[in-house]
Image (tube, helix red, strand yellow):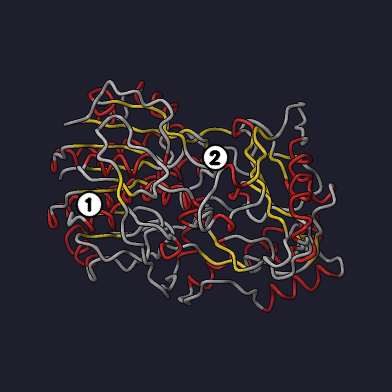
């Protein structure tokens, strides 16, 4: 193998340094010590479904088109898949040069590309993802035994002890390493890419419990060591999609703030706020769905909410008489979503659709199905939005946001209009942003451990300049750097640069990338994705 890229979700210097001090990651440490290591600045927004495509394409979301877990058709939403990534992946570029690849567990790679080599998709794909070549996942299971994309339990299941959950994490990590080693043996690729996801999820699910964090990273480090021993790649890179840390300040409810500022209208009843998890029950039952419609009971809850009987009010009564836990166990999962206050997107001037988009979208006439802001008013509305959001102040007197900016500052390309109109970057990523309407602007953080801007980049082994200055290394730089390590020119459309750990070969144009059409989101996706903890 010429070049190996190891993806460690949420890997960052603060976590690695502490793990290193406790002797937990000897194989990663050996690469850091023998090679070079630096912070890797993530993109805005630094969340998995958009950041990994940015890493493996080298372009910003305005070019590749994926901004979050779901994409939008007007006010409705559907799960993001690899079909939505409208840019060449590293492995399709290598395929153009007759170089082969093995790609295992990388997020947003379902459905897989047809390349010389093998792809087993990871997060955002089905539990039994169609892989490339056809039937290869069956071969993997025949060779190594079990292979699953997601844990064999649902997050929040209190019947399973934490020790068993962490053991399952370690089993999943082992599956990644074993599958990659088998496929690398079989296909002898020029390029290998394996990603470890649970190094991120352990923070979300277990609130940063350090013993659990150590156990999971030790398991990933062990698999990395086995891959290095068995395949001895010439060049080794480690990269992460973002960092991880504790959010020390209060959660900020953006739509509540915008409602008081006159931008947001709310309503009781409806489908609820957009999220990718609402489809999980139907998918778990085997239905092939890409969007979600409420059940009869969920519609009834929405109707009751329109006359004041909200799920929150009913819940308070049930709690008072001791039936709240019974109701939680037996009510349909999304009753609280349809039966509570939500943003009235059609009648609002501007709103936050999803917290992971890190921004506010204007309800523009001609772009949105029921837009209320005429195009001639767009610039003025956006300027006022920026001024109002810049003035948002936390209880400690500090600004909530370090940056409030037009989307053009962060995004450019043919898919830039799919982005939010105003980007909102929390100050030092210390405020969790919520899109859910609430009674107050601030409250206890829904997820106190969450994503930070700086990930990590490591380069080691033959041909790596260990004295290179990596100041300013960015997520977009990974793909062109991998191309250069393989002796190939980068795509001229890439936004990143070749990091000076290797010599650049220049750029060239490549044929346009063509996405497949009509991929079905398979059974169990939404329920399994919910375990990663992005649900508010």
| Left/right of residue 488 with respect to residue 76 in the rendered view | left
Judge by depth and name the residue closer to the eye, 160 or 154. 154
Coordinates of residue 108 in the picture (x, y in percent): 41, 57
**Mark 1 secondary-structure assignment:** helix
Judge by depth and name the residue closer to the eye, 67 or 32. 67
One can see residue 314 in this view: no
Tell me if mark 2 has few (under 14), some (14-19) or many (20+) residues whose alpha carbon lies within 10 angstroms of its own. many
Residue 450 circle label: 2
Tell me if mark 1 has few (under 14), some (14-19) or many (20+) residues whose alpha carbon lies within 10 angstroms of its own. many
Quarter holding the N terminus?
A: top left
Going 30% across and 29% down the picture, which residue do you hit?
Answer: 500
Coordinates of residue 159 in the picture (x, y in percent): 50, 54
Judge by depth and name the residue closer to the eye, 397 or 173. 397
Q: Is residue 484 above or below residue 297?
A: above
Counting residues from the N terminus, which is met first, the one under dot 1 or under dot 2? 1
Q: Is residue 259 above or below residue 38?
A: below
Going 74% across and 69% down the picture, which residue do you hit?
Answer: 370
One can see residue 18 in this view: yes
| Left/right of residue 394 with respect to residue 82 in the rendered view | right
Coordinates of residue 16 in the picture (x, y in percent): 38, 28
Query: CA gap, disc 1 to disc 2?
Result: 28 Å
Going 65% across and 45% down the picture, which residue do you hit?
Answer: 406
Coordinates of residue 296 in the picture (x, y in percent): 68, 79
Residue 111, picture quadrant: bottom left
Q: Is residue 262 above or below residue 222?
A: below
**Mark 2 secondary-structure assignment:** strand
Residue 180 circle label: 1
Residue 369, picture quadrant: bottom right
């Amino acid at each position: 193998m010429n070049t190996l890229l190891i993806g460690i979700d949420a890997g960052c210097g603060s976590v690695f340094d502490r793990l290193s001090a406790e002797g937990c990651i000897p194989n990663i440490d050996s690469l850091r010590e023998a090679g070079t290591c630096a912070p890797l600045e993530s993109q805005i927004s630094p969340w998995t479904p958009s950041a990994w495509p940015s890493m493996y394409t080298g372009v910003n979301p305005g070019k590749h088109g994926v901004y979050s877990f779901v994409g939008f058709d007007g006010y409705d939403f559907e799960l993001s898949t690899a079909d939505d990534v409208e840019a060449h992946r590293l492995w399709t570029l290598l395929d153009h040069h007759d170089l082969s690849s093995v790609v295992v567990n990388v997020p947003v790679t379902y459905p897989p590309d047809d390349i010389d080599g093998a792809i087993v998709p990871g997060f955002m794909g089905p539990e039994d993802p169609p892989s490339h070549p056809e039937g290869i996942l069956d071969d993997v299971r025949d060779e190594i035994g079990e292979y699953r994309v997601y844990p064999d339990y649902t997050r929040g299941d209190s019947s399973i002890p934490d020790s068993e959950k962490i053991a399952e994490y370690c089993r999943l990590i082992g599956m990644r390493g074993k599958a990659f080693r088998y496929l690398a043996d079989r296909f002898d690729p020029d390029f290998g890419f394996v990603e470890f996801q649970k190094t991120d999820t352990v923070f979300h699910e277990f609130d940063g419990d350090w013993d659990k964090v150590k156990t999971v990273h030790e398991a990933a480090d062990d698999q990395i060591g086995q891959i290095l021993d068995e395949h001895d790649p010439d060049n080794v890179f480690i990269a992460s999609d973002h960092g991880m840390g504790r959010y020390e300040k209060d959660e900020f409810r953006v739509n509540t703030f915008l409602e008081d500022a006159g931008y947001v209208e709310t309503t009781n009843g409806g489908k609820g706020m957009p999220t990718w998890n609402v489809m999980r029950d139907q998918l778990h039952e085997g239905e092939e769905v890409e969007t979600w419609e409420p059940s009869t009971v969920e519609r009834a809850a929405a109707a009751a909410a329109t006359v004041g009987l909200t799920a929150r009010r009913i819940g308070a009564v049930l709690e008072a008489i001791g039936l709240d836990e019974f109701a939680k166990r037996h009510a349909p999962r999304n009753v609280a979503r349809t039966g509570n206050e939500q943003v009235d997107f059609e009648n609002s001037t501007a709103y936050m659709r999803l917290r992971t988009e890190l921004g506010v979208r204007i309800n523009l006439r001609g772009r949105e199905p029921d837009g209320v802001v005429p195009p001639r008013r767009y610039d003025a509305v956006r300027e006022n939005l920026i001024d109002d959001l810049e003035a948002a102040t936390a209880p400690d007197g500090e600004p909530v946001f370090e940056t409030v900016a037009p989307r053009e500052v962060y995004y450019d390309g043919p898919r830039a209009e799919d982005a939010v109109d105003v980007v909102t970057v929390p100050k030092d990523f210390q405020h969790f942003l919520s899109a859910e309407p609430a009674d107050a602007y601030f409250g206890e953080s829904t997820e106190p451990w969450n994503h930070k801007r700086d990930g990590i980049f490591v380069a080691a082994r033959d041909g790596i300049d260990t004295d290179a200055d990596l100041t300013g290394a960015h997520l977009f730089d990974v793909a062109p750097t991998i191309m250069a390590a393989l002796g190939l020119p980068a795509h001229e459309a890439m936004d990143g640069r070749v990091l000076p750990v290797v010599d650049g070969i220049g750029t060239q144009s490549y044929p346009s990338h063509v996405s497949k059409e009509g991929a079905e989101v398979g059974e169990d996706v939404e329920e399994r994705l919910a375990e990663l903890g992005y649900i508010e």
